[in-house]
Amino acid sequence: MKLSRPLLMLAFVTLIALGLYQMVDIRRPDRPVGSLDQVAGLRDRDDVNVVIIVVDTLRADRLSAWGYERKTSPIMEGLAQTGIRFSDTLAQSSWTKTSMASMLTATYPAKNRITRFNHVIPQGAILMSEVFQDAGFFTVGIFRNGWVKDSFGFAQGWNAYIKPTGKRSDYNSNPSSVKLPGTDQQIVDAAVQFLRSASDRRFLLYLHMMDVHQYVYDHSVDFGRSHSDIYDQAIHWVDSNIGTVIAVLQQQGLMKKTIVAIVSDHGEAFLEHGTEGHAVNLYTEVTRVPFILALPFRLEKPLVIDTPVENVDVVPTLLDLVGLPPLPEADGTSLVPLIEAAARGEAPAKLDGHEERFAFLDRNWGRPNLDPVPWVMVERDGYRLHLHERAQGKPGTVELFDVRKDREEKTDVAESDPSQLAEMRGDIERFLSTPEPSWGGPGWVDLDDMEAMELRALGYAVDPNAPPKEQVHR
């Protein structure tokens, strides 16, 4: 029987995906079995590398390791099963620039103030990459999202900060009306080249994947034709790309001396609260993100930490694991004490200074000539309070959810629990009054036509020459 060309391509891609998965599984002995008691010893080693993989627009509840019914992510699930999974991680925004500025400086948006599309991280700010670089790590960042470009201040502290060039014909299937040139294969190709030449020098490698954001997928799985289905297919595609990176780390003998962190900047909405996409609100579907840690040794029994944590904790944790000093003025805190408590058989407790978790979005982030319209979320004691102000002097709205019973934030209990509402409004007031850091407020940049075109390719209708009412996101 003669197979059609599409079926031949499907069979070819499927064999590659299976081969990669088997390669990762077969080569696991390259990472020895260890225990949580060895975590503290990582600080004393002089050979531990760090790889941080940001999967843009990835919500935690669509991953196999979080119990999703579809097998969207076998590679990430495998890493979680031999490592550490933080089950309840909050992103600091539902928009990439604000979220990543917070993650990489470990500061809340109310402090760093990187909240609008033309904001720039100032030179005085200290990023994760600068601490690693000062400690002698060779630092490499590879990204495709224009919001973390060097022109927005994200290139500080990198020996190499690369945006791979992708041809417009290089993407796989993608239902979007706009298409970012290339695919995450360009990121993987660049990462593989670096890893094969890394030799014995210590390194920090940051990979920022974009194909889930763009709904890019291959045809190795077929979950359906809706946007939600295709989103799941894109996760599976990016998971296979992560598998390639892991396989090369194993082939090069690097997994036994590398910490791998998998995180995301925000999630994606599918009409749970009446909107699709992200950068519109701060409900759980756009702020609950994954955080997986794979250590230089495999745990025979995975560690799942249910204590609520945040993206501002990611970098303090990585720095602590390898014995580097914390970021100055950080709002986040190292999660290593949680890991060490688990090693002692103690029940995880709340972290000091982590009574509340915060997220922030300026809904006028794409309209720099208009006043800010903040949406703030605070979570404490099993409740989530949303305060979203209105433009043109209209009164703001508050919503209070008991997420112990209502994880999806469907039933507003603000009127039935006024005391909880009052306390948490006080939390938000204190959050918004946070003094700016010692490095000052953000810088500003005027987007040129090329930068605006790149951001349009992400799906944002950004026109630096348009009147304010037309400078909006999708």
Image (spheres, rainbow, N blue to C red):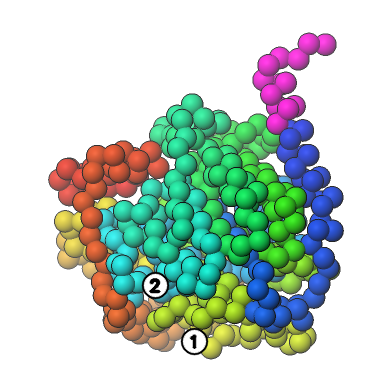
Q: In the displayed structure, does residue 306 sit left or right of residue 55?
A: right
Res. 408 visible in picture: no
What's the residue at 84%, 50% (across, down)? Answer: 26
The amino acid type of the residue labelled 1 equals Gly
What's the residue at 75%, 42% (across, down)? Answer: 20
- The residue to which callout 2 is attached is 126
* Magenta region: 1-13
**Quadrant in the picture for residue 403:** bottom right
Indicate which disc residue 308 carries.
Answer: none
What's the residue at 50%, 46% (across, down)? Answer: 210
- The residue to which callout 1 is attached is 353
Q: Position of residue 293 (x, y in %)?
A: 66, 66
Q: What separation in Å lies between label 2 and label 1 (alpha carbons)?
A: 21 Å
Inspect the magenta stretch and tell me whether residue 9 lies in it.
yes
Q: In the displayed structure, does residue 308 sit left or right of residue 448?
A: right
> Residue 90 or 275: which is nearer the viewer?
90
Q: In the displayed structure, does residue 474 sit left or right of residue 79?
A: left
